Amino acid sequence: MITDRFRKELAQFRPYVQGKPIEVVRRELGLDRIEKLASNENQFGPSPKAVAAMKAELDGVNFYPEGHPYELVTKLSKRLGVDEDMLIIGNGGEGILWNIAMTMLNEGDEVIMAYPSFDIYDITAIYFGATCHKVPLIDNHFDIDGMLAKVNEKTKIFWLCTPNNPTGNVCSVAELDRIVAQLPEDVLLVIDEAYYEFATARDDYKRDNLEYLKTHDNILVLRTFSKIYGLAGTRIGYAVANAAVASKANMIRQTFGINRLAQVAALAALDDEDYLQYVIESNSDALKTMEDYFDSRGLKYITSYANFIWVDLGVDSKKLFTELEKLGVIIRAGYLWGYDTCARISTGTKEQMRFLLECLDQVL
């Protein structure tokens, strides 16, 4: 039977579960209004300059894009102060994570991650026959000692999501310095900074982890255009690493994995500083609105450095998800990570936040 010829890893493979799409909820419930606050998408929309650039490029979509987007690589190189051969451009942050796993992992290798964190770290490990060590957070902080204790001769990748998804907490400078100092030179430290721009908008997060690349060859920093730039639907992200690491990752990238619209949108978005500031301010307002509401109800939450908040609502999150969905609000229920009373809720516009809190009032 053909099914006997599948990769053996598929027997234990668990696909990523995305936030429930608006289209699915509309088909199931027939609602006119649905606010999806489940997938950390930028609810304020993309940069108008990025939209204009994509519209101008539409007549050219019958042609394949550049496999290695020269203009974007050049602009990012100058913007970040890194050599062009240190850059990896991918089909969103997730595409780059899969690329890293393909570059590094063999059957029997091991990787390390915090838990809860981004599920793709675990999923890619399973797919390539590696073992993933999940080290639980302690009091909403990374267990640095616990994570470092898992490092051994089989360790290939040390995944670190900061700000962390789904909890929104960050790894402090002192903690990251310890990881960098103690991690063996042949273990790749992947610093996933998908929410980097949101974090640096806060007064207590003024750092640039690209500085580690000047002194260490085993570090890769990942960022994306999906979040603050509002280009999640185009799928484009980038990473910076030692040239030797980047060259291997680029060697096996999809030939035409970054589409033409994504390339021009990213180029235009990088030049729209006014838009970036607008999103940062709007995101901060939305976080404060949710924090004030949770404070008024005595609900515990983690201070967020991203565009979502992790809160303990004190009720069954599976039931909460279902009841909110009936009212037209989609959130990410904490039971998916084993936190039965918690939820991850993305930020949104003032009107979306008002609607969310009205619905929470009804359900709670």
Image (cartoon, helix red, strand yellow):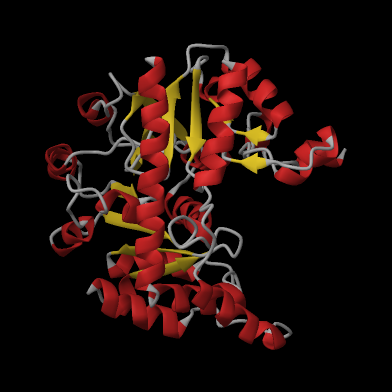
Q: Quadrant of the C terminus?
A: top right
Instruction: Name the one closer to the observer, 128 or 14.
Output: 14
Q: Where is residue 142 in the image (x, y as percent from the top left)?
A: 27, 29
Decide if residue 251 is on the left or right side of residue 127. Answer: left
Residue located farthest toward the top when viewing the structure as drawn: 315
Instruction: Name the one closer to the observer, 251 or 15.
Output: 15
Instruction: Name the one closer to the observer, 268 or 4.
Output: 268
Q: From this viewpoint, is residue 277 visible?
A: yes
Decide if residue 55 is on the left or right side of residue 249. Answer: right
Count all numbered tags in the image, as a single digit: 0
Q: In this view, does 52 lie above or below 201?
A: below
Q: Where is residue 325 in the image (x, y as percent from the top left)?
A: 69, 29
Q: Where is residue 184 in the image (x, y as percent from the top left)?
A: 20, 43
Q: From this viewpoint, is residue 128 visible?
A: no
Q: Position of residue 351 (x, y in %)?
A: 55, 44
Q: Residue at x 35, y 81 (%)?
A: 75
Decide if residue 216 is on the left or right side of residue 61. Answer: left
Decide if residue 331 is on the left or right side of residue 138. Answer: right
Q: In which quarter of the image is the N terminus?
A: top right
Residue located farthest toward the right when viewing the structure as drawn: 1
Q: Which residue is drawn at 36% across and 67% down?
A: 246
